[in-house]
Amino acid sequence: MKKFGVASKVIFCATLVGLGFSVCGAQETLRSLAEERGRYIGAILNSEWFNNSIESQFEEIHKTQFNAVVAENEMKFDATEPNKGQFSYNKGDRMVAYAKSNKMRVRGHALAWHSQVPGWVNNIRDKQQLLAVLKNHIDNVVGHWKGEVAEWDVVNEAINDDNNHGWRSNGSVWFQTIGAEFLDSAFVWAHAADPDAELCYNDYAIEWGLGQGSKAGFVVDQVKRWKQNNIPITCVGTQTHIEISHETTPQNVRALAKALAEYDVVLNITELDIGFPKGSANNLGASDYAKQGHLYRQFMDVFLEEPNMGEFMIWGVTDAHSWLDGQQGKTQGLIYDKQYKAKPAYDSLIASLKAHPASEVKSPYKSAATQDTTAQDTTTRDTTVRDTTVKDTTVKDTTAQDTTTRDTLTTPGPVVSDTGNVSIRRGTATLTDVRMNLVGRTLSIVGASNAKVQVFDMRGRPVYSAVTSKGSVDLSAISDGLYVVRVKVGSKTLERRVALR
């Protein structure tokens, strides 16, 4: 199992004129919060990245916010073996090198799939010949990236779409020529090529529930059979390409995770996007994006609460480069808009991560994760854990409404919304047992009954001062905007940036 590297943080500093102190914080990211919890959050590298035709901010966001990566198309059969016995690894090697330099986990997608298979494979009609082709492909591709690709989608989308599910026959050269044994063989060969790699069955529409005749139920039955027959499957991937109206799917994913846990199998969310109906882009408002954010958060909540879930992969970074408009009849399904501005969905994922303290999140990768990160990043992680109990109540209700203030600061890289409770500390003694909680315009001070509260604008000019009454102060008299709040108890202080709306 791959280990995590040092948790990624975006660092920013600014001097508040007139106050004589610097605002410095380790900006929490999706990546840093996931790493602290022993989990992986990732996104594809779009084919435009491989072809050097993507905006520069794409890669900066990708490596800052994510610690896992998968290729959109560049490791599929037609990309890696376009001609029989002639393997092409250049683009995959480029992604693996990128992942290494940025300490990211690599998913391999996909070894055996009925789609994106080159014509020379589809023309084979002899069972033994096609088995030999599949084995040779797996031996070479998995062997080439042995120890570098942590997890493979060994078989992809092999279940049919009928109500009474079975293996896909129409359009699958593998099933039509070999039969169902191609799946068992593919897992055995992949394990032989890299015994340390995690091996997944990956499919869509298994997030629809475990009812009679469901694809998810069929998957669980096959996992049981594979386990009984010592077929080396370790994980299932639920693609989870859904629309905004599919509100029951997070709990369906939870049920699937619990069912797979009985067989010691991990469930990973491998291709998540939550789109709106195509053609609706010009009519979407704040409430629509807030609803999208809420649904993203529900998936993250399930992901963090089920101990046999390890990866949360989004099928894209920005709506500017997404397959939804062209191939799925959906739109605007990712967590960054076409201008690379983080949407409420991003804020909601951050909020969910903060609402689940690292000490309470169990993970199939926990031991590997903490070996690297705890020793190297204890200081910043301590400040995060200390604030999580307060952030849960505040962020949960406000992140979806606070996308505009993110643009008011000049800071490097993506910035969490200002209700994301970025810590602002001075070089003087700080309060370790006192917390601030802003709900609406009421600022509550937890841990001190009498405290002096000062509010400064972002140029350091004082705009408000009061002493707490019963542990809180009313900030209704202050105009909307971004401020720094200083709480003093004796000689110690606590400072935080807040956004008032």
Image (cartoon, rainbow, N blue to C red):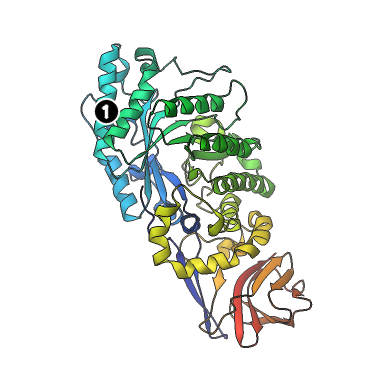
How many dots with numbers?
A: 1
Question: On screen, 256 above or below 59?
Answer: above
Residue 127: which quarter of the image? top left
Is residue 81 visible in the rendered image? The answer is no
Residue 474: which quarter of the image? bottom right
Q: What residue sits 55% from the left and 49% below the top?
A: 304
Label 1 sits on what residue type?
Answer: His
Q: What residue sits 24% from the left and 38% below the top?
A: 144
Residue 134: which quarter of the image? top left
Q: Name the side, left or right, on which 276 lies relative to 272.
A: right
* In the foreground, 32 or 474: 32
Is residue 429 visible in the rendered image? The answer is yes
Mark 1 residue element? helix
Which residue of the protein is positioned furthest toward the left in this rendering?
Answer: 85
Q: Name the side, left or right, on which 81 lies relative to 472.
A: left
Residue 455 pos. (x, y %): 67, 78
Q: For mark 1, what is the residue?
A: 137
